[in-house]
Image: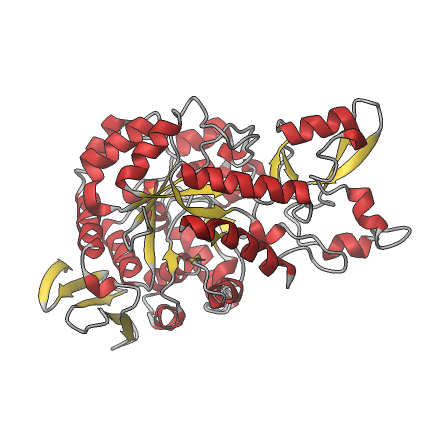
Amino acid sequence: MPIKNKAMLITYSDSMGKNIKETHEVLKKYIKDAIGGVHLLPFFPSTGDRGFAPYRYDMVDPAFGDWSDVEALGEDYYLMFDFMINHISKKSEMYQDFKAKHDDSKYRDFFIRWEKFWEQAGENRPTQADIDLIYKRKDKAPEQVIEFNDGSKEHLWNTFGEEQIDINVKSKIANDFFKQTLIDMVKHGADMIRLDAFAYAVKKIGTNDFFVEPEIWDLLNEIQETLAPYKAEILPEIHEHYTIPQKISAHDFYIYDFTLPMTTLYTLYSGKTNRLAKWLKMSPMKQFTTLDTHDGIGVVDAKDILTDDEIEYASNELYKVGANVKRKYSSAEYHNLDIYQINSTYYSALGDDDRAYLLARAVQIFAPGIPMIYYVGLLAGSNDLKLLEETKEGRNINRHYYSKEEVAHEVQRPVVANLLKLLTWRNNFTAFDLDGSIEVTTPSETTIKVVRQDHTGDNVAVLEADATKKTFKITANGQVVMEQN
């Protein structure tokens, strides 16, 4: 089905029930019209990173179900699948065939062969300056040795985890794989494809190998052209300075709003609404808003919307106010990959405070774009310290596994019931149409007023909030929808 202007749930296949079938049952029974779409996080066979190291895309991991379960979910909700355009697992057919046959493999150009890549630049490359220039996720060169069956060795580009080997997006064999995989995804119900880590995909000598222009636009356009006949969209995923997503928006792609989470936290910690108002006025309508995702709470995304001092203040307050949030949970001790993200549920970042949390979600609902709600956030979940300590994986603090029975219990909590009510109302009120308008004012230093109106002017939604008192009132055409005194 086409993408609808209705909130999208982000969930794993086994986090609201044991598998996709149980997730579908839970959504129909307890969540109902609060969401209209589902981002089903990677459900393919994978060797790590909670599904983000897939080794094939032509089947569903049997632990989660099969294609019929995915397609059944797609009959009730618009769906988004992940495509890891930057990398694939070492267990993949491509890697295994290359390892076995070396230069006789049909996949000999599928990966970025480190030595061959740098040969183009001349002798004694890469230099330390070359390595230092690369936008890295590690404290060493992004390469990993491959030992072929014939006993020889090379290195392959390896940006992320040990299992996630980078793909040579410039090769024909990779592009053929991209096209076939994307078309197959759409045939199985994907209405939107999330391009995971796409900004790392293009490598070019003399650059930092991150969001390399103009080549990155060629890649995005090729993918969009592949999907266009099927009426499917792409959502490029990038955690960086807000100006880069705005560039993508200017090319008429959907984008993520990853600036809103930290900006909203700063607003609710400080009581000052000026930064939030500035951001809401700048934001495009063709986007998906977030407060939380399967990763941590992004910090770098809000730079220059918040000053460096304000970002530091908000980060310090998160550790002070947040429920059971400690700095070490976002460190190497807990396998944190990104120093620019803080590991916590959004509910716990606000001190497990129902009033602050519901106000934060009200802000998200009134922000330009379509709300995306992570499953832990939908259920106002607290930090899962048990799972965190069992796994020593920082991001697992925000990845609780809910049974069907737990979901049934959580939706009875007033904060969750009110959030579901707000989302259901928002999904069905035309004032939030993407071709409508938004007006943002700050009547005082601590208050904000957001007015959303459809293009006809017939339907108007108003949010009036006080960031210090955590009070708000929402009206629709003058009638009170919800009030928190």
Compare residues 215 and 35 and report the one nearer the observer: 215
- Which residue is outermost to the left? 479
Farthest residue in the front direction? Answer: 229
Residue 333 location, quadrant? top right
Q: Which colour scheme is used?
A: secondary structure
Q: Please state the horizontal and vertical placement of residue 358, each as a whole percent of the image.
A: 24, 53
Image location of residue 6, percent across then percent down = 27, 52
Q: Residue 47 lies in what quarter of the image? A: top right
Q: Is 346 rendered above or below residue 151?
A: below
Q: Residue at 69% of width from left, 45% of height from top? A: 171
- Please give left or right for residue 445 compared with residue 49 in the image: left
Q: Which residue is drawn at 90% across and 50% down?
A: 124
Is any atom of residue 57 visible in this view?
yes
Name the residue nearer the viewer: 265 or 220.
Answer: 220
Regarding residue 415, the answer to whether it shows in the image is no
- Horizontal side of 188 relative to 425 (left or right) equals right
x and y, in percent, of residue 131 in the image? 76, 52
Depth order, front residue of 410/475: 475
| Image point (63%, 47%), residue name | 137
- Can you say whether 380 is above or below 163 in the image? below
| Image x and y of residue 417, in percent | 17, 44
Q: Which residue lies furthest to the right in this view?
A: 123
